[in-house]
Amino acid sequence: MHCRSIQVYYPWSMPPVKRRKTAPAAACYRAWRSQPAPALREAAWRRLDALTERHLQSVWYDPQFRPASLTTCGGERVSVLSAGRWNLSAGPDFLDACLVVGPERRTLRGDVELHIHPEDWTHHAHARDPLYRGVIAHVTYWPGRLPDNLLPAGAIQLALKPVLDADPDFYFECIDVTAYPYAVPARDGVGPAPPLAGYTPEAATALLAAAGEERLRLKAESMRAHLERVGPRQALFEGLLAALGYQHNRGAGRRLARIITIDRLEEEAAGRPLSAYALLLGVAGLMPNPKTDTWDAETRRFVRSLWDVWWKMQSRWEGQCLPRQAWRLAGIRPQNHPVRRLAAAAALFTATPPLEQALRQAEDAPPDVWIARAAALMSADDAIPYWKHRLAIGGKRRDQPVALLGAARQATIIANVLVPFLAASGGRTQPLLAVIPPEDMNQIHRQTAHLVFGPNFNPTLAHRGLQQQGLLQLFHDFCLTNRLDALAEAADDWRQAPTA
């Protein structure tokens, strides 16, 4: 496979629009990633949407998330004595699992394969693959039953969605898939040689841009599916509260958005940021204790003003509020604390014009102007004056103003929420991709660059937001699944493809 006509433009807005005959970079990346090499065949199905097979593997692996009570498609109860060994090579997802099934408590020992849909077993041609002859359980997210003759004799079929949906505290966003089972394992203490170490800067930049385009396309596709379910305003509300939740509080933020809903927030707050903030804090279970003796006078007045609003609403939300334990609070920097981040949410969703409308109004502006306006929308620091000079409730008042959302968090929201939302709702997004602002380089960015391009990777090649998104896509496609050998097999095709 050779992609001989990669162009520097990004026609990926949703819903689908008429495309130029020349394949966009993301399409070329997908075709390149989907090479029929045995080690890579499975990776083509591991899409980076809201739910991936990696999420299901993490659920199965971790007793914290794996349901204690499981039932086969035939109605038999299943107990997991051992989830098995996480398999990072070709073959089933878990090896040597041990399950106890049915009232007679028969024991099954063997391998476990997980998919999102039951029919993925057929799509992946596992029935013809001898590596899967030892499968004792086919575990899927969506319910459905395959004919028994497609699976190894005696294999059971389980669906996770019904039991996960029954748990109100479970959200896939609570799972850090990069932590399972460990980042990228070494082989006998020596990792594989970086497969793209010989790439020229031009080839590396083109590959990262194409992979970044693919990642953002998938985000837009996932956002569009959610938008069709809940509507654009609620989809944006959920996406932003999840993004404001930072790494460990994304799930709690989305759960809060689903409890309150944008319609109820607008009804209760009536455009008043302080009322919106009191509602968010109250339902989140994070309302500050007004009897704290160590606060200064300004803080006591501010907290009292919040309670003056909340006590009037409280009875309407009885039984719906989250427990404080729903949030990860220990070890969180003051800038990332949910009490502070919810102030930003209150400001964003009481602004005039509404956020969705403001994004639309800027759509025809030049790309760099749209990005600047989007960043300005994230900087509603005057809406709740208390936070303009504070990092935390009761914290020391600072002489210089402190932004509710720093530039790095603004960049994260623009790339991961606002641009995908605009694309999902049919907006013109192609020109924006080249000017997406960069986030702070994190451990995954650096690790992927080291593993894929080698220790001499020039960080300036990933100084743009699109290239950073590309590093994340390469991580999920190749590093996280330990398929760097497959990446090496496909490397020559991309290296030979022109980038103009």
Image (cartoon, rainbow, N blue to C red):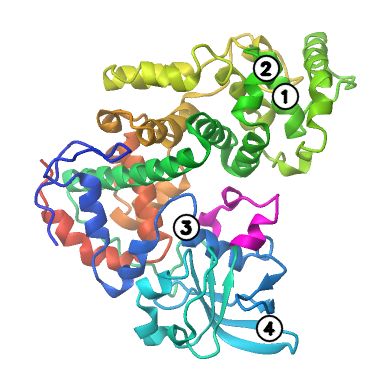
Answer with mark 4 or mark 1, whichever residue precedes in sequence.
4
Residues at marks 1 and 2, CA–CA distance in whole angstroms: 8 Å
Pointer 1 with pointer 2, Cβ within 8 A: yes
Residue at the (36%, 29%) spot, across then down: 437
Residue placed under numbered mark 2 in the picture = 269
Residues at marks 2 and 4, CA–CA distance in whole angstroms: 52 Å
Pointer 3 with pointer 2, Cβ within 8 A: no
Quadrant (top left, top right, bottom left, bottom right) of the C terminus: top left
Answer with mark 3 or mark 2, whichever residue precedes in sequence.
3
Residue placed under numbered mark 1 in the picture = 279
Residue at the (72%, 24%) spot, across then down: 279
Residue 33 position (above or below residue 92): above
Residue placed under numbered mark 4 in the picture = 101
Residue 437 relative to residue 246: left or right: left
Answer with mark 3 or mark 1, whichever residue precedes in sequence.
3
Answer with mark 1 or mark 2, whichever residue precedes in sequence.
2
Residues at marks 3 and 1, CA–CA distance in whole angstroms: 33 Å
Front in this rendered view, residue 363 or 395: 363
Q: What residue type is labelled 2?
A: Ala
Residue 158 position (above or below residue 160): below
Residues at marks 3 and 2, CA–CA distance in whole angstroms: 36 Å
**Which portion, as a residue range, is magenta?**
161-180
Q: What residue type is labelled 3?
A: Thr
Front in this rendered view, residue 237 or 15: 15
